[in-house]
């Protein structure tokens, strides 16, 4: 199973009337300074695929911390079995390929519970 499949999930009725497992995970790690530009390019490719395919059962956000090399991924999925479809995306597979050469610290996945979430009518633009 992928590191993006959380250790903790809660049952929640889906809007489609099917009981689904909403699972969330937060993954943090650091990237080697010389690999940051390529790492960001690969993350942007994942978002480009998400923008193109518009899956309605995945929420995903990536932030780079102020030190410039620390990254935090926040992912939630609403699926019948609690799995996260994100690792199945071609761009995400490409992001994962050779990741050991880019990271300075191993990714640490932590299961999380969403307390609240807000999405503006107009999406926040990425820089």
Image (cartoon, rainbow, N blue to C red):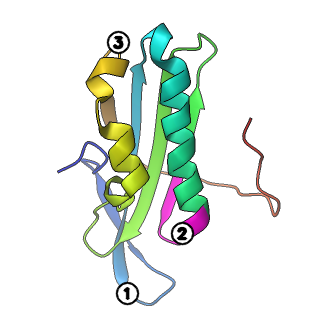
Q: Tell me the magenta residue range.
A: 52-60
Mark 2 neighbour class, 10 Å CA radius: few under 14, some 14 to 19, many 20 or more: few
Residue at left 43%, top 17%? 31
Whether residue 102 is situated above or below residue 90 in the rendered picture:
above
Quadrant of the frame with the C terminus: top right
Locate residue 107, reporting x and y percent: 32, 27
| Precedes in sequence: disc 3 or disc 1 | 1
Q: Which residue is mark 3?
A: 104
| Residue 6 visible in this rendered orientation of the protein | yes
Please provide percent x and percent y for residue 36. Answer: 51, 19
For image coordinates 57% across by 42% down, the residue present is 44
Q: Which residue is mark 2?
A: 53
Q: Which mark is residue 18?
A: 1
Q: Which one is nearer the viewer's eye here, 47 or 56? A: 47
Mark 1 vs mark 2, foreground winner is 2
Q: Residue furthest bottom?
A: 17
* Secondary-structure class at tag 3: loop
């Amino acid at each position: 199973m992928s590191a993006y499949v959380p250790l903790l999930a809660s049952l929640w009725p889906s809007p489609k009337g099917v009981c689904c497992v909403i699972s969330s995970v937060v993954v943090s790690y650091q990237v080697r300074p010389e690999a940051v530009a390529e790492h960001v390019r690969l993350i942007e490719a994942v978002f480009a695929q998400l923008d193109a395919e518009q899956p309605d059962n995945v929420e995903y956000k990536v932030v780079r911390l102020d030190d410039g090399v620390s990254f935090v991924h926040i992912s939630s999925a609403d699926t019948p079995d609690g799995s996260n479809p994100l690792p199945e995306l071609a761009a995400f597979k490409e992001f994962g390929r050779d990741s050991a050469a880019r990271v300075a610290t191993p990714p640490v996945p932590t299961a999380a519970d969403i307390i609240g979430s807000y999405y503006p009518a107009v999406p926040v633009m990425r820089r």
